[in-house]
Image (cartoon, rainbow, N blue to C red):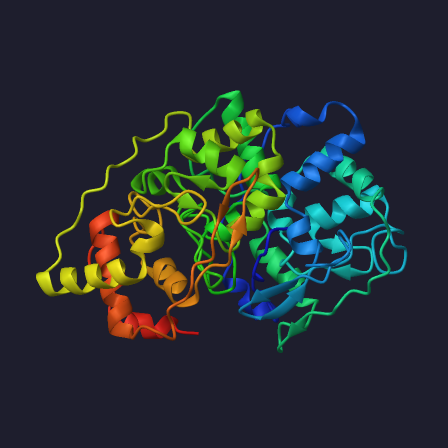
Amino acid sequence: MAHLLPMRAMLAAAGLAALAACGRQDDPLPPPSPPIAAGQDQLLRGRYLVQAADCAACHTADDGAPFAGGVPLASPFGKFYGTNITPDAENGIGNWSADDFYAALHDGVAPDRQLYPAMPYTSYRQLTRADSDAMFAYLRTVKPAAVPNREPELDFPYNLRFGVRFWDWLFLEDSLPDASQGSSQAWLRGRYLAGALGHCAECHTPRGKLGQLDPDQPLQGGALGRIKAPDISPAGLASRGWTADDLNILFATGIAPQGAVFDEMFPVVHLSTQHLAKQDIAALTTYLLGDTPPAPKAVQPAQVEPRLRDSGKGLYTALCAGCHGFEGEGKPGVAVAMQGNATLRDPDAHNLVAVMLDGIKAQDFPGTAAMQAMPGFAGTLTNAQLADLSNYLRARWGGQAADVTPESVQALRQ
């Protein structure tokens, strides 16, 4: 059960044991308070936890039965498919016990197979037994669906499931080092929400060559999918202008002054964080920024040479200003603002260029908020034009160097 997570590499031979994992944490997560919005009823609590863990993102396919699996999970090692976790006896978890469910979450071991770490038991192992039991109790109440599971489509040697045992032996840790500092109850609760339930590290932490999370760079950005997961460490968030209030708004609604969620972060908000209690959203934000948040940095527009400025401005006026505003102010319900946009403020232009090439589908957010579709320009603009436009946007509204080249744009063309 997870947000869309590309596969962490597994070992196919014990000869790779020399790449030993870093030492384990000596301070496991403290038992958290129960979810604030769920009360003491186990089924309500389990439903809340399943939403907080974003299980539906990987286990409910578009137009499919809830939790019946089938969601494709792309990875550098092949394609995985979310499994059936309904109470169906043949295809789902109908014959599982609470002990079996806890073993899957904590150790990556199902009754009949070793699980690939595409299911992030590397994070879920931090869940308490009480929370695991509540999640299992809730999942037992959903409608059984007789939907067969699809086998992963992996190349050799990654199709050798037993190799996961060696990967676990080397890399499975109880938890990663913390990206922020704190000791308040809100920080401790947020630590559990981000580390165990939200499994933020799975996408937002860099990985080694074998797919293992890098304990030296917790939450400092990951590069597994088409869109890179940005740096959400306190320093990384502050460098792009994020405040606690703005993060609270983003997790609750998907839209903040720094922009709107898209790509893999959209279902995180749609299926998970918007359903969290306000106190839990605040706790999650407290953990990400720390008990003493760093001050958000103001944008300092960068200088660009006249040719680039004129070319980029002309392209923006002709193609972008109608939706994003001539001064980059954005239009509610249409397009996000360019002023202070977090994607433009990212030192890495990868996501900006990818979005300009591919576009973004229309999105409906909680309540009545929405964003219109953004067209992709892969077929209408040259690499040089896209580089000029990217550099203009990043310099004017992101304060970043004009370092996007036609070659870097070409490298991102699908």
Picture coordinates of residue 64 (x, y %)? 74, 58
| 349 horizontally vs 280: left or right | left
Please give the name of the residue rendered at 55% of the width and 63% of the height, measured from the top-left corner. Answer: 17
Tell which of 386 and 142 is nearer to you.
386
Picture coordinates of residue 211 (x, y %)? 52, 61
Q: Residue furthest bottom?
A: 156
Tell which of 269 and 334 is nearer to you.
334
Quadrant of the image occupied by residue 258: top left
Above or below residue 225? Residue 335 is: above
Please give the name of the residue rendered at 80% of the width and 33% of the height, measured from the top-left corner. Answer: 43
Q: Quadrant of the C terminus?
A: bottom left
Residue 202 seen in render: no
Quadrant of the image occupied by residue 119: bottom right
Tell which of 97 and 35 is nearer to you.
35
Please give the name of the residue rendered at 85% of the width and 42% of the height, measured from the top-left corner. Answer: 141
Please give the name of the residue rendered at 35% of the width and 61% of the height, measured from the top-left corner. Answer: 350
| 64 horizontally vs 183: left or right | right
| 348 horizontally vs 30: left or right | left
Residue 240 seen in render: yes
| 180 horizontally vs 51: left or right | left
Quadrant of the image occupied by residue 381: bottom left
Tell which of 44 and 180 is nearer to you.
44
Picture coordinates of residue 210 (x, y %)? 51, 64
Picture coordinates of residue 192 (x, y %)? 58, 34
Above or below residue 351? Residue 283 is: above
How many marks on residues?
0
